[in-house]
Image (cartoon, helix red, strand yellow):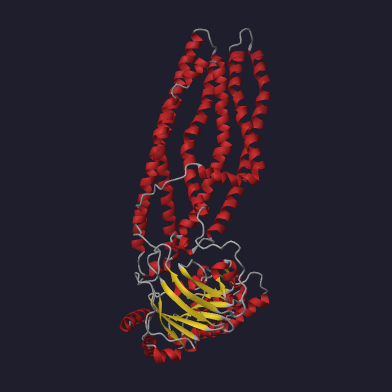
Amino acid sequence: MAQTVSQASPGPQIKVPSTAHKPTQSSPDKDFEKDLTAPDTGLQNLWRFMAFIGPYRIWVIGACITGLIRMVLPLYMPAFVKNVIDRVLNAHGLNYAQRMHLLWGMMPLLALILTIHAGATLGRIYWAQVAGTNAVRDIRYLLFDHVQRLSLEFHNQRPTGGIVARLMNDVTTAQNAFDLLFIQGSQNVMQAVVITGYLVWRDWQWALVSFATLPIFIITTRLLRQHVRTASRQVLETNSRISGHLQERISMVREVQSFTREDYESRRVQRQVRVLKGYTLRQFFLNAILLASSEITRTLGLVVMLVFGVHRVLHGNATVGDVTAFYLYVGMLLAPVDFLSNLYTNLHSTAIAADRVFEFFDTTPQVQDVPNARVLEVNRPPAVHFEQVIFAYPDDPATLVLKGIDFEVQPGWRVVLVGGSGSGKSSLMNLLLRFYNLQSGRILIGGQDISQVTTHSLRQVIGIVPQQPLLFRGTVRDNILYGRQGASDEEVHAAAIAANAEQFILNLPDGYDTVIGERGVGLSGGQVQRIAIARAFLKDPAVLIMDEATSNLDAQSEALVLDALNRLANGRTTFIIAHRLGVATTADLVLVMQHGNIIERGNHDELIENGPIYRHLWAQQVAGILTNNALKSVTNSLSEDHE
């Protein structure tokens, strides 16, 4: 049988963790006061976004063509007005009927132009939306697929709401770049170029006078550029943080109400939205300055142009129709100028969203398959061997969580891990699933190093029954099928029967088709546990990890769950994280852990005889006073006495 050890195994002399690993966190409210002006990548990521438009280039071409048609046709309007003024209103020697005849003769062409313009407008909107919506669909799917494959460390360091905000809000915002650049952008730039070229060709002196005020806008825009970008980033980042906080707190409403923390949470949100208000007002103020400079450019430009035009008319160098047409063309030119004046602000708002989206895309999983990784194939049940495993979490590499862990598990053994919080039990199981990489050492399943096999095949042979299982919103059947998609109804029923869940499932309103709430709302704790066990039965893993899940159940539910767990463990190599020592009596190997070391090992009888720490814990268990905190304090104090 396994060796009994009553002293801490030697290991590197380094700072010892006293609590379970948790992501580094700052003060909750200070997160909203942080500098949110992280370096950005300019417009680089916007062009990366455009790559997703590629598969829908036919729609983009259609949108661009209809957009150009929509842009060109209105250029006829100033010429039409000029003809009305010069040929109809100012025509000498023509009576009223003749003038009206001339006017109505111009109407068919105008009606045709307006009809084509309306059709082109509809076409541009439709084609652009099809291309943009398809691209957003692809980005959102690929981003979700990528994010769910990232390492646990990534998810531990980010609130769920913030991740969801990037998947939904930021991706949608980035879609605006397509319309701004390819559709509206190309249309407005072309319109500005055509009108400017025509005005310069028509009368270059008059055109230069009309453009005299443009430097005001250009200088203002350049001065405010970085400030506008910073303000936009602050608003977007703070919105994301608040979204994450709200989602987290709403999902914890039961805890909030049970601790009567409603007022506290309301005050926190009030402080956060106050910060957002400040950033938003600053953004609006900067945009208002840009808008004001645009209005000044527009108004002064028109005034100067009209004064110069009147001068030309009075000297006989132009007609009233010429002035009117020139005025209308300059007015049409100001629309692209307005668009371009806001383009920087709008484009950089979308650029920030694109930066946030591609920050996730550019994050690589810390745990990746090695080149030419093999598929893990094992005999059932397999042997498992931890060889001198040393591990520290990536966010605190100087603090070792596991120090030289070494033990071997024979095929089909049940291994019970005992120790207080922070002793390394959960970390050990996370490494077995390869949620993290080791600092050194190896873990072997069936004689194969798990770092050399694909993570997919590794996790396919391992099943988990957590202490607090998470059920999804959906039917009972769907939740069980999560263990193995495509299983038959007979297999689902067999799994439920094995998990002692069939009876209560059939008593539900719609049986297996009963819709349960998120996280199993509507079911008791024991029922949730048994559905999770049925899910594990359906997966039929070769290796099983169980976080003992009966501490909060009533006696009847506990008996049903324990019976199902025992049945599930048969024929599998099983690891059990014990919160109470009753499960240790039938274990093949019990590991007592403290501060990342195995301080005692053996079966129950051996440890009762030779393991003072375990023997003391068992005595407290029998006396009915052992709790997790007591477990931690006892292992700490007794291990120090025996070191």
305 relative to 473, above or below? above
Residue 316 visible in rendering: yes
Residue 223, given in percent of the width and then of the height, sits at 39, 33
Q: Residue at x 34, y 56 (%)?
A: 30
Q: Tell me residue 54's x, y (percent).
A: 63, 44
- Tell whether 421 sits left or right of 323: left
Where residue 82 appears, x then y in whole percent? Answer: 58, 17
Left or right: residue 276 compared with residue 184? left
Whether residue 343 is situated above or below residue 604 in the rendered picture: above
The answer to which of 445 and 249 lies nearer the viewer is: 445
Q: Quadrant of residue 369?
A: bottom right
On screen, residue 592 above or below 169: below
Q: Identify the residue at horizontal 37%, vertical 82% (top origin).
A: 7
Left or right of 543: which side holds 548?
A: left
Q: Is residue 494 above or below residue 204?
A: below
Of residues 443 and 509, which is closer to you in this image? 443
> In this orientation, does residue 508 appear?
no
Residue at 49% across, 51% down: 359
Residue 459, percent across and down? 57, 70
Q: Residue 453, located in which quarter of the rendered image?
A: bottom right
Q: Quadrant of the C terminus?
A: bottom left
**For this rendering, which residue is in front, 120 or 13?**
13
How many tags in the picture?
Answer: 0
